[in-house]
Image (cartoon, rainbow, N blue to C red):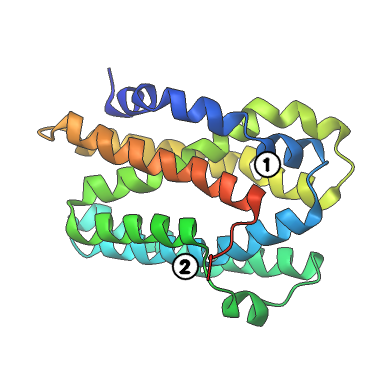
Amino acid sequence: MKLTEELRSSADHIWKKILEHPFVIELYSGTLPLKKFKYYVIQDYNYLVTICKCFSLIASKAEYAVAQRMLELAHMEATTEMDSYKKLLDKLGMKLEDVIKADPSPTNTAYMNFLLTTCSLEPPLEGLISLLPCFWSYAEIASKHKGLLENNRNDIYVEWAETYTTREYLDLVEELKALINQMSEGHDREKLKKVFIMASKYEYMFWDMAYKMERWPL
């Protein structure tokens, strides 16, 4: 069994909850209150910046071929993805300056710290595995719920969701999985599973955080 198949199987109980989370279902069906989506988008800014940093951290320790690709992905996050994010803000009537001022939620802060710690202190493979659940689960969500988009009357939600059904995005997910499988030889699979499971738990918590519009208690 390939490492990524083993990782996915180890976290299946978590992914089932992700795929059926109310935020996900309501978003794809078009019934999600807009205020919850805006909250999600605000939190996503900090996460997007963190992903960019994580790819750069992995690149700093990886062999050249991997490092080169990680830097390309970091550049993509900082340019193409950020440009798409700004366009989404415009459609929602939001300003980037206001988003930057917003504090990351407790869950988002913990998730970002987990990713940054893993990518900075652990081997490149573990860093990549910590990032994989985000990319891969969005593709699975889109595949499972694309039928809901047929009756979704919220154009913003439909356009956002369709991003994760594009050939470009799906190819990126497959590339990350292939890279992880290629790098897996000689590594402790049980330790790698723990990283993947923890990242998957944070993915679920991120959706839950957005649905509840989580706030700091003080």
Closer to the camera, 75 or 93? 93
* Three-letter code, disc 2: Val
Q: Toward which corner of the image does residue 88 lie, by quadrant? A: bottom right
Mark 2 neighbour class, 10 Å CA radius: few under 14, some 14 to 19, many 20 or more: some
Q: Which mark is residue 47?
A: none
Q: Nearer the observer, disc 2 or disc 1?
A: 1
Mark 1 secondary-structure assignment: helix
Is residue 142 rendered to the left or right of residue 134?
A: right
* Three-letter code, disc 1: Phe
With respect to residue 206, does 88 lie above or below? below
With respect to residue 23, does 65 lie above or below? below
With respect to residue 183, does 67 lie above or below? below
Q: Position of residue 186 (x, y in %)?
A: 9, 33
Residue at (55%, 44%) from the top-left corner? 169
Camera sees residue 79? yes
Is residue 43 rendered to the left or right of residue 9?
A: right
Spatial distance from mark 2 to mark 1, Cα to Cα? 23 Å
Camera sees residue 81? no
Closer to the camera, 114 or 28? 114
With respect to residue 185, does 62 lie above or below? below
Q: Quadrant of the N terminus?
A: top left
Q: Position of residue 203 (x, y in %)?
A: 48, 44
Residue bearing mark 1: 23
Residue at (80%, 55%) from the top-left corner? 34
Residue bearing mark 2: 49
Q: Position of residue 26 (x, y in %)?
A: 75, 38
